[in-house]
Image (cartoon, helix red, strand yellow):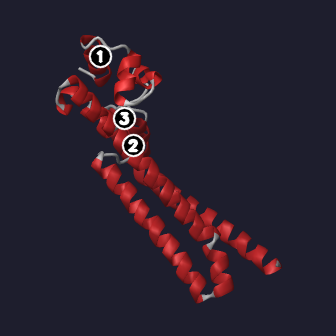
Amino acid sequence: MKLHDQIKKYRQEYGFSQEDLADKIHVSRQTISNWENKKSYPDVDSLLLLSLLFNVSLNDLVEGDLGIMKRVLMNHDLDIWTKIMLAFLSLGVVVGIPLTYLFSKWGLAVAIMLFIIGISASIKVDSIKRKGNLRTYQEIIAFMEGRKLSDDEKIRDRNGYWKVELLMFIGSALITAIISEIILLFIKLL
């Protein structure tokens, strides 16, 4: 049984309205409605309060939803680490190049630190992808949309994957070089 059904079932068994349940676990009535209509999931604190209120174990309450919850958490982690990676690699280019030009060794040290943080985040993104057995961009997109690719689609995508990786690397290098040159020209004009 899914969590949204469990919440509704126990709420009705105990004779609570959505408003009553909301008051007991310190959330809004709309939040209860969103949980029951699969629009959102309760946080850990709310789950614990629900299990205590309904006198059921947390495992019984979330039975059948653990896979969904793991996917949601992994998706959230993937989003966060991707944003961190992009932010620090971008800062490394946009801030690091002018600092290196202006302050030589100290500017270079700052740029290297920004790149190290960005690369570390990139490694974390890769570990999340490996944990979810995600290898191609199609698999990542399907994972984030909550669907699965067929075996044929996976094989087809993985055969040409190295080409996409190579093009992404070359494209990133070209864009970085162009942005770097523009920034250096702008600094020289000042």
**Residue position for label 1:** 11
Q: Is residue 151 visible?
A: no
Left or right relative to 12: residue 18: right
- Front-most of residues 58 and 165: 58
Q: Position of residue 21 (x, y in %)?
A: 35, 21
Residue type at numbered disc 3: Glu
Counting residues from the start of the chain, the first of labels 2 and 3 encountered is: 2
Q: Position of residue 135 (x, y in %)?
A: 35, 48
Residue 108 sits above or below residue 28 on the image: below
Q: Position of residue 176 (x, y in %)?
A: 61, 66
Residue 138 against residue 10 in the figure, above or below = below
Residue under the point 64% across and 68% down:
94
Q: Is label 2 in a helix, a strand or a loop?
A: helix
The residue at which mark 3 appears reads as: 153
Q: CA distance from mark 1 to mark 2?
A: 30 Å
Q: 133 and 90: which one is in front?
A: 90
User: What amino acid is found at the position of numbered circle 1 in the picture?
Assistant: Arg
Give the foreground label among 2 and 3: 2
Indicate the position of residue 181 as horizontal and vertical percent values: 70, 72
Q: Quadrant of the C terminus?
A: bottom right
Q: Around disc 3, counting alpha carbons within 10 Å, would you say few (fewer than 14), some (14 to 19), or many (20 or more)?
A: few
- Report which quarter residue 26 is drawn in: top left
Q: Which residue is mark 2?
A: 75
In which quadrant will I find the N terminus?
Answer: top left
